[in-house]
Image (tube, grey):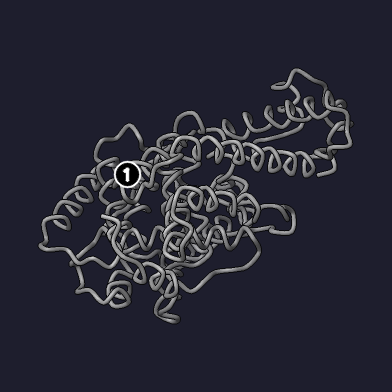
Amino acid sequence: MAAFSTSRPRSQSREITGIADAARSVIALKGLAGMSLRGVAEEAGKSVGSISHRIGDRGSLIIAVLEREIELLSNTRAEWRDRTAGHDPLALGALPDLVCEWLDEGAGTRRTSAIVTCELALLASRQPDTLPRMAALMEGMEALWCDLLPATPEGRGLAHLIACYCQDEQIFTILLSTQTDYRLLRHSTIRGLLRGDKPLADRAPTNWHMALVDRLAAPASAAHDATARPPEGAKGVLADHIADVIVSQGVGALSHRTVAQAAGVASSSVAHHFPSQRDVLFAGVEAVYRRMRSRILDSGARLASSDIVRLTHECALAALSDPAFVPFAIDMRRRRAENVHEQIAQWLEISENSDRAKVQAIVMASIGRNLQSLAAGDGLLNSFDLVQIFKNRTSVL
């Protein structure tokens, strides 16, 4: 962080900014795992030695990238304040438009920042001490919505909900923004988020929401097999090792070799039970979900484990470069609510299946909130209080 000290010469600060931007471009293309000093040097048109001299090692470069994202978000906040200056989004009924536009901008002009922010959050969720300023970036995203909404307890609560929801939804918008059914489903979910405690007059919105879910079942079908039974014996043991690799290293680390190393067996043994990369991923995802279901039954109060929080975003990030992951990303956006729908409906004091969009919105806000909390080093949060924030305000729509 010393690299951004105001005591440094302005020309040198510009040079460091250029290196950080080069690193951001590499991360957006190859992921944080694929960023190396050599790759950044090639992108920046500099030598590795120059980058090492100006910034330091890879860890210092990641910190420089984080500081750059904090700076860029500050600029973006100013742009959005100017955009809405003198206008009350709540009075205008424009808040749903602003949320959709923010997400679409993240898939467009802010795409690099949106991907980099997600990558940094995932890194910090596993190693929070490596990015002590990650909380500042997360707080800045919520502050943007506080800037746009009334400075009241209700406005701050709404800003918190929107920031948490966008934290989760953003990566899906980047990945799926060209799919009309996804965009319609996203709009339905945003309306559910902004309805507050207002009950639906009839089932038409829920029927519409579920019809869109069903339409997305086809492109997501490759991510699951309804007839498949949990693997047993040696195959079941390997599936658990695959899940362990996902939990400890992320989806991007999955290969026959990494699983074989974790299991202490030959790669050929892994390939015998799981011939393709899809087979490996499917087995690991299902194993992680079985663990989640078990934990939900045990605790009853959490919407997800930290493993599911990370897995959701890692699959979506992986799908940006490998289309084989796309079905898993689509499927995960839906299935995270399956095991907790009844609990959330009870907390909301609504009948089960009466407002699926609202429940899905709460689940997604909870996932985003927990990623932020993990990245700040605070651990998982109970989702009941998020539901209370949701309930203790009037409807926006």
Residue at x 20%, y 52% (from the top left corner): 209
Q: Residue furthest bottom?
A: 298
Instruction: Give the camera-side residue of 346 and 250.
Output: 346
Instruction: Give the camera-side residue of 6 and 387.
Output: 6
Along the horizontal axis of the image, is 131 left or right of 139?
A: right
Question: Image quadrant of residue 350?
Answer: bottom left
Instruction: Give the camera-side residue of 292 and 334.
Output: 334
- Report crowding for label 1: few under 14, some 14 to 19, many 20 or more residues within 10 A (C-alpha): some
Query: Circle 1 sits in a helix, a strand or a loop, which is it?
Result: loop
Location of residue 21 in the rendering, given as x and y in whole percent from the top left corner: 67, 29
Residue at x 34%, y 51% (from the top left corner): 90
Instruction: Quarter of the image for the C terminus: give it.
Output: bottom left
Residue at x 64%, y 58% (from the top left corner): 126
Location of residue 8 in the rendering, given as x and y in whole percent from the top left corner: 88, 33
Location of residue 341 in the rendering, given as x and y in whole percent from the top left corner: 29, 69
Location of residue 172 in the rendering, given as x and y in whole percent from the top left corner: 40, 43
Q: Residue furthest front?
A: 86
Instruction: Quarter of the image for the N terminus: give it.
Output: top right
Question: Image quadrant of residue 340?
Answer: bottom left
**How many numbered marks, from 0 up?**
1
What residue is pinned by disc 1?
94
Instruction: Give the camera-side residue of 227 and 42.
Output: 42
Residue type at numbered disc 1: Ala
Above or below, comparing residue 352 to residue 219 in the picture: below
Whether residue 382 is visible, yes or no, is yes
Above or below, comparing residue 154 to residue 347 in the picture: above
Residue at x 79%, y 42% (from the top left corner): 60
Along the horizontal axis of the image, is 346 left or right of 248?
A: left
Whether residue 287 is visible, yes or no, is no
